[in-house]
Every structure is written in structure tokens, then in C-alpha cells.
């Protein structure tokens, strides 16, 4: 029987007066995650080090209000489409849709993370629940037809569960009444030393991928699937994250570091290891397991906090990393990428687990 405890408290009010709550899931080891139903944001994540000390290892804010204008998407659920769609153009079954344009890197307009008010800016309906024998939090959001320019009424459900063996599981489900595209992910920024405790270049990283998708200067995939071998993108053997991060290479110059999608080596449809990160001083290890075909590794090159972080910590460039499990960016415009189309009667379901251990 699961011994996970769940508690709830007020977290603040939205500009329209609605209240947001903060839910805490905690296991017998003391590991705990704090999630608000505003944006499904993971606000805090306390994980033990090798001495048994608990540290919060994700970036974020102590105040709800700071999240309203946060451009980093700290800890948020991302949808309806994670990552970028070039020019916000979507062609689907003979129809053309113009999505919201909310980013223009190097003058290249795109729809990023679902538009101006994506899933990260929605107040989700929250309910304590149990799934697969684990206690957790169920978040529900109805994304109405036309929200962000996307077609179809999309009912999205996300389950957060915490296990006794320090696994944080995120399960995404969705259904639609019209053909649409869906690509949901989680945008936590991790520093295994602790939030605000310096840079992440000395973290060790492994990514289970022999290929990645190169981008143009607008950070949009070109459509090519390129081998990582003999490039700074090769993390098939675990090594120091920052070893070649500043190499004078077009792909790194475009993004100021890593901000690319890796094509995961997959054998089936179930959960498979996508990435492993180790921080040697604390002894913390995080593994990312997923059913998704890709993972966006972002080395925090453009971290730009909206004021001080939690506990008045200062956040800066490369102060954390993201590992966003996903389908590939701009998939609707590349027939050679796995499809992100969801049609009426189909069920969207993906799972990602963040597994924490010690070395």
C-alpha cells in the first residue's frame, strides 16, 4: 500500500481573482514534489543527496505572481504543442491554420510552446487520485477550439505520481473532436547541486541517441536527421556536459549552447531510458525514461528570471538544464518526422518518469 502523503494549500490568486493551489506529494524517504494547478508547474522538488540532505533541485519562484510573466516556462506543463512550429503555420487535412506567433529568434517567427497563453498559463482542474496503485494528482484542462489558433476541442489530462522508490511519473492523455496536433511535455529546469547553486556544465550526461535534428538560425529543425558521432552532440558515453558546449560550431552558435532535439534509440513502445544526469559532489543521479521518440536537451543558455528565484537565489545562464521528452519540433512541417496528429476517436497517451538515485 502506498504511503505517499498528499496535502494542499493556497498558492495565490490569478489576475481574474481565481485561486491557485499548491499540492505536495511526499514519500517515506522525504522526497517531495510541490505542484500548482496554475500551469501544472512543479514549483519545488526536494531530493536527497548521498548524506541524506534534501535540496530543492528545480528552478522556480516562491510567489505565484512571478510565474505570470515568466518567459522561461520554469517547471510548467507545455501544450498544446511543445517546442516550435515554423511561422505558426499548420496544414492539416486540406485546411490551413495560423497559430499564434510568440517568438521570433533571429527574425524567424514561430509558435512556441502553444502560443501566448499555452497550457503553462492555464488554471487546471486538480483532483487527488490514484493510478496504477500510486497516489497522485490529476490535472484536467479543456483547450477549446481555436485556443492559440489550434483546431478542435482538446481535453487534456495529466497525472503526476510519486513512488516510494523516488520516481516522479508524468502521464499525459488527450482526446479531440477535430483533427489537431498534440505534443505535450514538462519544462522543469534541473540543477542536481540544488536550485541556484551554480552552473551545470560540470554535470555528467548521457543521452541514448545516435542522431539529432539540426536547426536553422531560427532554431527550427531543417528536416535533416544527423548522426551525433564525432560531434559535440555525442553523449552516447556519459561525459561532462560542458566539455564542448562552447565549440565554434554552427549548430552551437545558433543556440548559444545546446537547445536541440535528440532522436532517441528506441526498441519498442514502452518506457525506455532516454537520458541520465549525474552530479558527483551531491551524488545525485537522475534518469529520464519515456515512451516518446525524442528529447529536447536545453542547457539553460537563455535563462532570464523574472526577479529573484526561490529563497532569493540568483539564477543565471546555464544555471540549470531541461530534458523535455517530446515528439520532434516542427513535426507538422516535416513528413519524415513522427506524426503529432490526433484525430477524433484516437487516444493520446505518453509517459515520462524522472527516476532519482545515488551514485
Image (cartoon, rainbow, N blue to C red):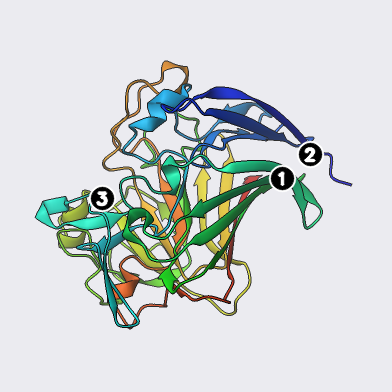
- Residue 301 appears left or right of 147: left
Residue named by callout 3: 257
Q: Earlier in the sequence, mark 1 or mark 2?
A: 2
Instruction: Tell us which disc is closer to us: 3 or 2.
Output: 2
Q: Where, by quadrant of the figure, is residue 302 drawn? A: top left
Q: CA distance from mark 1 to mark 2?
A: 8 Å
Instruction: Tell us which disc is closer to us: 1 or 2.
Output: 1
Single out the residue that lies furthest toward the right: 1
- Residue 355 appears left or right of 13: right
Q: Secondary structure at mark 2?
A: loop
Q: Earlier in the sequence, mark 1 or mark 3?
A: 1
Nearest the viewer among 255 and 198 is: 255
Q: Where, by quadrant of the figure, is residue 227 drawn? A: bottom left
Q: Identify the residue at horizontal 59%, vertical 79% (top origin).
A: 268
Nearest the viewer among 177 and 349 is: 177
Q: Which mark is residue 41?
A: none
- Residue 42 appears left or right of 168: left
Depicted 299 relative to depicted 58: above or below: below
Single out the residue that lies furthest toward the top: 312
Residue named by callout 1: 136
Depicted 233 relative to depicted 210: above or below: above
Q: Position of residue 329 (x, y in %)?
A: 33, 65
Q: CA distance from mark 3 to mark 2?
A: 38 Å
Residue named by callout 2: 4
Q: Earlier in the sequence, mark 3 or mark 2?
A: 2
Q: Position of residue 291 (x, y in %)?
A: 57, 68
Q: Badges 1 and 2: C-beta atoms under 8 Å apart?
A: yes
Amino acid at each position: 500500500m502506498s504511503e505517499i502523503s498528499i496535502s494542499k494549500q493556497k498558492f495565490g490568486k490569478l489576475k481574474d481573482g481565481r485561486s491557485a493551489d499548491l499540492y505536495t506529494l511526499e514519500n517515506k524517504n522525504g522526497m517531495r514534489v510541490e505542484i500548482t494547478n496554475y500551469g501544472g508547474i512543479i514549483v519545488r522538488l526536494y531530493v536527497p543527496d548521498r548524506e541524506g540532505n534534501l535540496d530543492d533541485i528545480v528552478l522556480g519562484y516562491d510567489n505565484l505572481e512571478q510565474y505570470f510573466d515568466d518567459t522561461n516556462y520554469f517547471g510548467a506543463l507545455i501544450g498544446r504543442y511543445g517546442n516550435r512550429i515554423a511561422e505558426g503555420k499548420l496544414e492539416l487535412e486540406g485546411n490551413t491554420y495560423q497559430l499564434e506567433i510568440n517568438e521570433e529568434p533571429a527574425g524567424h517567427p514561430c509558435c512556441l510552446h502553444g502560443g501566448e497563453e499555452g497550457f503553462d498559463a492555464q488554471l487546471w482542474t486538480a483532483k487527488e487520485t490514484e493510478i496504477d496503485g500510486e497516489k497522485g494528482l490529476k490535472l484536467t484542462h479543456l483547450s477549446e477550439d481555436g485556443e492559440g489558433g489550434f483546431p478542435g476541442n482538446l481535453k487534456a489530462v495529466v497525472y503526476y505520481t510519486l513512488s516510494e522508490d523516488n520516481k516522479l511519473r508524468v502521464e499525459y492523455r488527450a482526446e479531440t473532436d477535430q483533427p489537431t496536433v498534440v505534443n505535450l511535455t514538462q519544462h522543469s529546469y534541473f540543477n542536481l547541486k540544488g536550485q541556484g547553486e551554480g552552473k551545470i556544465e560540470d554535470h555528467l550526461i548521457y543521452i541514448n541517441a545516435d542522431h539529432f535534428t539540426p536547426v536553422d538560425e531560427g532554431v527550427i529543425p531543417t528536416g535533416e536527421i544527423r548522426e551525433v558521432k564525432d560531434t559535440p552532440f555525442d553523449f552516447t558515453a556519459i561525459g561532462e556536459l560542458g566539455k564542448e558546449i562552447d565549440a565554434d560550431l554552427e549548430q552551437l552558435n545558433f543556440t548559444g549552447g545546446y537547445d536541440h532535439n535528440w532522436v532517441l534509440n528506441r526498441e519498442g513502445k514502452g518506457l525506455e531510458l532516454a537520458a541520465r544526469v549525474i552530479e558527483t559532489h551531491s551524488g545525485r543521479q537522475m534518469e529520464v525514461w519515456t515512451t516518446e521518440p525524442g528529447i529536447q536537451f536545453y542547457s539553460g543558455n537563455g535563462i532570464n528570471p523574472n526577479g529573484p528565484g526561490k529563497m532569493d537565489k540568483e539564477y543565471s545562464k546555464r544555471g540549470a538544464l531541461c530534458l523535455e521528452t517530446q515528439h520532434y519540433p516542427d513535426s507538422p512541417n516535416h513528413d519524415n518526422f513522427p506524426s503529432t496528429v490526433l484525430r477524433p476517436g484516437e487516444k493520446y497517451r505518453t509517459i515520462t518518469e524522472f527516476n532519482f538515485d545515488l551514485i
